[in-house]
Image (spheres, rainbow, N blue to C red):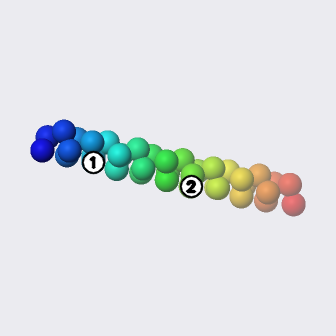
């Protein structure tokens, strides 16, 4: 049970990091596009 719980927590942690990184990338691209306009 410990292993399953830890693996689930790690995958959740990695998923949240990926989502946050994607949001930052979209934000940066948006800012760059505004700067070019």
Q: Which residue position holds label 2? A: 23
Badge 2: residue crowd in 10 Å (few <14, some 14–19, many ≥20): few
- Residue found 72% across the figure and 53% down from its top: 29
Image quadrant where one finds the N terminus: top left
Above-or-below relation of 6 to 32: above
> Is 33 left, or right, of 3 in this rendering?
right
**Image coords of residue 17 (percent x, y):** 45, 46
Tell me the residue at 27%/42% (across/down): 7
Which secondary structure, mark 1? Answer: helix
Identify the element where label 2 is drawn: helix
Q: Is residue 3 left or right of residue 18?
A: left
Which one is earlier in the sequence, the residue at label 2 or at label 1? Answer: 1
**How many neighbours does mark 1 have within 10 angstroms: few (below 14), some (14-19), or many (20 or more)?**
few
Identify which residue, 32 or 15, lies in the foreground. 15
Q: Is residue 8 left or right of residue 31?
A: left
Q: Is residue 2 above or below residue 32?
A: above
Task: Give the image location of residue 23, x and y in percent.
Answer: 56, 55
Foreground: 22 or 8? 8
Which residue sits at x=14%, y=40%? 2
Percent coordinates x, y for residue 20 in the rendering: 49, 51
Disc number at residue 35? none
User: Is 33 displayed left or right of 19 in the figure?
Assistant: right
**Residue bearing mark 1:** 8
Q: Position of residue 6 (x, y in %)?
A: 22, 41
In the image, 8 versus 23, the foreground residue is 8
**The residue positioned farthest toward the left in the image shown:** 1
Q: Name the residue rendered at 42%, 51% in the picture.
A: 16
Tell me the distance, in whole angstroms, between the alpha carbons under discs 2 and 1: 23 Å
| Closer to the eye: label 2 or 1 | 1
Q: Residue 14, located in which quarter of the rendered image?
A: top left
Dot 2 and dot 1 residues touching (CB under 8 Å) = no
């Amino acid at each position: 049970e410990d292993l399953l719980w830890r693996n689930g927590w790690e995958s959740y942690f990695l998923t949240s990091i990926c989502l946050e990184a994607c949001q930052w990338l979209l934000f940066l691209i948006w800012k760059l596009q505004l700067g070019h306009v």
